[in-house]
Amino acid sequence: MTKSTLDETVGYRGLREWLEHSERFGELLKIDGAHWDTEMGAITHMMTEKSRGQAPAILFDNIPGYPAGFRTLYGQFSSIKRVALTLGLPLEHARKVDIVKAYHERIRTLKPLPPKIVETGPVLENVITGDDCDVLMFPVPRHHEADKARFIGTADGVITLDPDEGWYNVGAYRSQVYDGKTIGCQITEGKHGRIHRDKYFERGESMKVVILCGQDPLLFMLSASPLPDGISEIDFMGGLRGEPVECVRGPFTGFPIPADCEIAIEGEMVPGQVLPEGPFGEWMGYYSDDSVPRPYVNVKTILHRNNPILCCAPQHKPVDETGLLKGIAGAAEVWRALDACGIPDVLGVWNHEAGPATRFTVVQIIQRYPGHSRNALHIAANCQGGAYAGKWTVVVDEDIDAGDLDQVLWAMSTRFDPMTDIDLIQKAWASKRDPLWLPGNFNNRILVDACIPYDMKLKKTFPTVVDVSAELRAKIKAKWTNLQFPGF
């Protein structure tokens, strides 16, 4: 990237400033009159599914049955430009993987900053307690036609406290609405929030939670990211920003709640209290996680700003915003693990959006030694950023752009031998959102070495690629400046 490109970053604070910037970029669509019952979800699905990373964020207002100003926001991360805006990274780039590279470089030396506790903030403009609590005061959507309930938590951040070590986790866990004072909180095994809950329940203790339903997009992105154990997403956000996140103390939980949050719901989960949860159209694009009894949240307090914005991320078959969101965050964590394990010359990591999320990971390297590609494959597939619910992990050479699926498929079709260039991993960490999950919540993985065989690369015996040299490309572009050559 050029110096001018690196300078083209935008700073913002809070969801509403983020919306202002997105609108100025021409990436915010405002729609009035859509109904909460499937219309908002269907519009978002239809706007996103064939957008190839160019769909707008959608702000719905004047929702039938609700006051004007009670809005919902969909599609925060359905474009790479808005991901870059959220992370404070360059808005223009030559390759998609440049976003991951810039984010990776940012977090390599990041030092988390604990939040700054303040006495008041916009989230305290409305404080509702006890019998007055009713989460259906907000235009909570039924996102998909086959959903059996409305879900207030999809683009959310659920705050939990580790009872042993005292650190706060923020995770994106779906929240079904049973009634105005009772909502779900589905947390997958192995996730930090689930580990916290298990610790409380094993002791026969209730667990307090805060469910943020309209937070800064950066906190939502981090809540869906595989951060290391013991690191709070609020602290990590402060480190990325270079300043602490201002938080108020929740009146029921005492937890830090971002002061500029749109909606925060405080409650507690009690051992033995369960209700049937689901089904919900999930991020792999299927209704594959059957409805089963799960612990729920008793709502104690609702905090919200005037004219609140409820953030939503209804997953559907690819592509959707969560594929891009989780893909970029996960790719950066994979890159960090490769570095930590001493894998040299990693040039790019990309999780392809149609995967979705971390189901099709590509790592781009410069081969330096025999077995280099296999080392990269196994670390990428087994590190925290790639372990959960992965399926395909592919490694390619330096001349293959990891973010360009056409190039990746070319490498898989011409530099890969099915007998010698595949490794398999059995009984890996799965998700029940996977239609083919195995009993015990396992799955199997395929690792594809799509690099030129190292000995042929070293001896230069592999056939020469038909291409235009960098020198001739530069001459052509300089001579025919009126031609717009396609490229990302």
Image (spheres, helix red, strand yellow):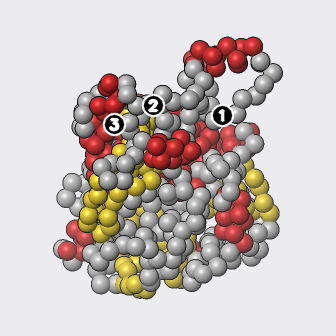
Q: Foreground mark, 2 or 1?
A: 2
Q: Residues within 10 Å of mark 1 (few under 14, many from 20)?
A: few
Gap between marks 3 and 2 measured at Cα: 12 Å
**Residue tagged 2:** 463
> Is 350 on the left or on the right of 190, as rendered?
right
Q: Determine the image quadrant of residue 112.
A: top left
- Circle 3 sits in a helix, a strand or a loop, which is it? loop
Indicate the position of residue 439 as horizontal and vertical percent values: 29, 77
Indicate the position of residue 131 as horizontal and vertical percent values: 51, 80
Q: Please report whichever mark, 3 or 1, sits nearer to the chain's N-terminal start.
A: 3
Q: Residues within 10 Å of mark 2 (few under 14, many from 20)?
A: few
Q: Please report whichever mark, 3 or 2, sits nearer to the chain's N-terminal start.
A: 3
Residue type marked 2: Pro
Q: Foreground mark, 3 or 1?
A: 3
Q: Foreground mark, 3 or 2?
A: 2
Disc marking residue 487: 1
Indicate the position of residue 119 as horizontal and vertical percent values: 46, 48
Residue type marked 1: Gly
Report the residue at 68% width, 77% height from top. Answer: 37
Disc marking residue 453: 3
Report the residue at 32% width, 53% height from top. Answer: 419
Gap between marks 3 and 1 measured at Cα: 29 Å
Gap between marks 2 and 1 measured at Cα: 26 Å
Q: Are marks 2 and 1 in contact (CB under 8 Å)?
A: no
340 or 368, nearer to the observer: 368
Q: Determine the image quadrant of residue 4.
A: top right
Report the residue at 33% width, 48% height from top. Answer: 421
Q: Are marks 3 and 2 in contact (CB under 8 Å)?
A: no
